[in-house]
Amino acid sequence: MADARRISPLADRARIEAPDGAASLAELPHLGRLILRADGAAAARAVKKALGAEPPTEPNTSSRSKEALMLWLGPDEWMLVTEPGSEEALFDQLKDALSETHCQLVDVSDQLTNIELSGARAREILMKLTTLDLHPRQIGPGDVAGTTFGSVTATLFVTDDVKKHETQRFQLIVRRSVADYMWCLLAEAGREFGLPEQQPRSGETMRP
Amino acid sequence: MLDASTLGKIDIRGRDACEFLNRVYTNSWSNLRPGQCRYGIMLGEDGMVMDDGVTAAIANDHFHMTTTTGGAAAVLAWLEDYAQTEWPQLEVYLISVTEQWAVASICGPASGKLIAALCDDVDTDPEDWPFMSWRETAIEGVPARIFRVSFTGELSYEINVPASYGLWLWEKVMGEGAQYGITPYGTEAMHLLRAEKGFIIVGQDTDGTVTPIDLRMSWIVKKTGDFIGKRSLSRADTRREDRKQLIGLLAEDPETVLMEGAHVIATAAEPAPPVPMLGHVTSSYMSPTLGRGIAMALVQSGGDRIGDTLYVTRPGAEPLPVTVTETDFLSAWEKNDG
C-alpha cells in the first residue's frame, strides 16, 4: 500500500524513450532493498531455510527466491531486492532465521534506487560510461558488477528475466544523492540514439 | 532547522562492536547503554585527529555511528580495512546507511515543545530526555529516531526518518514550527553557532597535524586501553610542551573579523623576515549573539597564554592586537553579559 508521503529519488523523472526501441530509461521506484552481511555455510543455510534459496556464492552473480533477488556484492555481503512494500516482511523472515548467526541485516530501501536501461542500444550506451567489459561473452543475464559509471559508483545487474525475442535489459542500482546525475549521464550517453536531453536538477551541464 | 542529512552514518553490528569502537575512538565505549549517545574522536595511526562524530548505542551489539560529511566514505573504508586485515577475529560488521536516513536538526529554546508536538507518542517531555540520548518514535506513523544531541550549544534534537520521507518531514516541521517562529538555517550559520560554543570542525580547526591534546581535549583520550594512534601520542614530537594548541582570540575592536588563515605573531609590529610565526587563525566569524567578532586559532603553547595579548597579521596593514581566551565564548558571555 503506497504511502504518498514517500518520494523516490527520481520521482520527478518520467520514463524517456528513443524512437524504434533503440533505448528507454525508467526508474523502478520504491523497491525493497536489504543489505546482508554474513559469512560461511551457516549463513547460507539460514537464508535457504528462510527463503528457500541460497544466496549466490560465486562472485558477481545472483540468485532468486520467491520473494527476493539476491545480488553478490562481496565475499560476505549481499543485496536483497524485493517488491515495493515487502522489505519489512523479508527483513523479519531473515532476522528470525539468522538469529543464531553472526550477521548484519540493514534496510537500505531509501538509500538507493534502481534505474532500468533497455533497448537495442542499451549495451552500447553503458559501454561508453564504464571500463567494465560488457560484451555478452563476458557478462550475461544474472550477472552483477559494482563499478564506476562516469563519476559515480553503482551496482550493475544484467536482468535475468529476458525472454527470447527481447533485448537485454540492465539495472543500475545507485545512491539517492547521485541518482539524478546517473539519470542525466545515461540520457546523455543515449542522445546519439535518440534519447531526449535531460537537464540535471542541480543546474550543471552534462555537455561542455 | 538545518538539513543534516549529508552526515556519514554507519551501522555497526556484532558481539565485538563495542570493543571495535574502543579501538577506533580515543575514548571508552564500554559503559554506553542502549539509548545513549557519545561524542568520539578518531585518530590516524600518526595520532592526528582524522574524524569525529556522535555514535549511539541501539543495543549492546548494535551502534549507529556518525561521521563528518566529507569523511564518511574514507572512515567506512578505514574501519572496514581494520576489521578485515587487523582484527579479523572480531565479530563486527559495518554497513553504510548515510543516505538511508534524512536528518532534520532542530535547535532553539522551543525545540523541545516542537518535538513533543510532532511525535505521535512520547512518554516523557523531550526536554526531560537526558542530553546525549535518543528515542525510537514516529511522526504521523512515519518511523523516526530522534537524537537529543547538539552541535550549536542550544537545546537541540536531530530527527532521522527514512530518506524518502525527507521532503515530507521538512514541510511538516516548517508547518508545525511556524507557531514558534521556525526558520531554516544552513551550514554557514551552523559553523558560526558551533564556533560560539568552541566546538571544533575537523578539517577546519584541524589539518591532519593536530592531536586531541593540541585541541586541549585530553579528557577524551582514555588512560587505559589501546586505540588507533595511541602509540603516536607518545612520540617525542607529539609530547612537546610547545606544540600549537587551540585557543580563542578576541580582537581589540569588536567589529573586527579576523581573516581565517592569518598568522599569529608575538610582536605589535611585523619584524623583518623571517617572522617568527606562533600559529594561525582557523575559524573566524561575526557573532550576532555576542555582538562581536570571535575566532579560534592554533597557537604555540596556546593553553599557557590565556589572557595574554598577541597580534594577528594582515596584508598591507599593522598587525591587530588580540586577547587569547578559552574557546567556549558562549559560556563566558552567559556568565558576564547574558
Image (cartoon, rainbow, N blue to C red):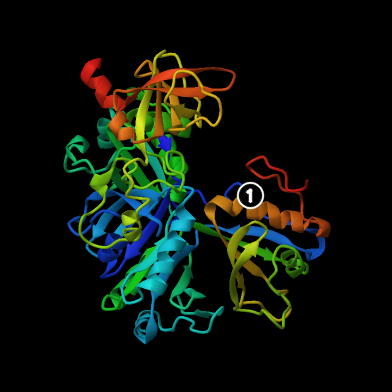
Q: Secondary structure at mark 1?
A: loop
Q: Is the residue A108 above or below the residue B16 in the image? A: above
Nearer to us in this view, B319 or A143: B319
Q: Is the residue B11 above or below the residue B303 in the image? A: below
- Residue B316 in view, yes or no: yes
Q: Horizontally, is B2 left or right of B18 in the view?
A: right
Q: Quadrant of residue A67?
A: bottom left
The amino acid marked with disc number 1 is Arg
Residue drawn at x 67%, y 70% is A169
Residue drawn at x 36%, y 53% is B42
Residue drawn at x 27%, y 75% is A99
In the rendered image, residue B299, in percent from the top left (x then y), is placed at 39, 34
Q: Quadrant of residue B193?
A: top left
Q: Is the residue B264 above or below the residue B290 in the image? A: below
Q: Horizontally, is B70 left or right of A205 in the view?
A: left
Q: Chain of mark 1?
A: A
Q: Residues within 10 Å of mark 1 (few under 14, many from 20)?
A: some
Residue drawn at x 16%, y 40% is B124
In the rendered image, residue A10, in percent from the top left (x then y), is placed at 58, 51
Q: Horizontally, is A168 left or right of B246 in the view?
A: right
Residue at mark 1: A13
The quarter in which the N terminus of chain A is drawn is: bottom left
In the rendered image, residue B11, in percent from the top left (x then y), is placed at 36, 60
In the rendered image, residue A58, in percent from the top left (x then y), is placed at 52, 84
Q: Horizontally, is B234 left or right of A131 in the view?
A: left
Q: Is the residue A78 above or below the residue A148 in the image? A: below
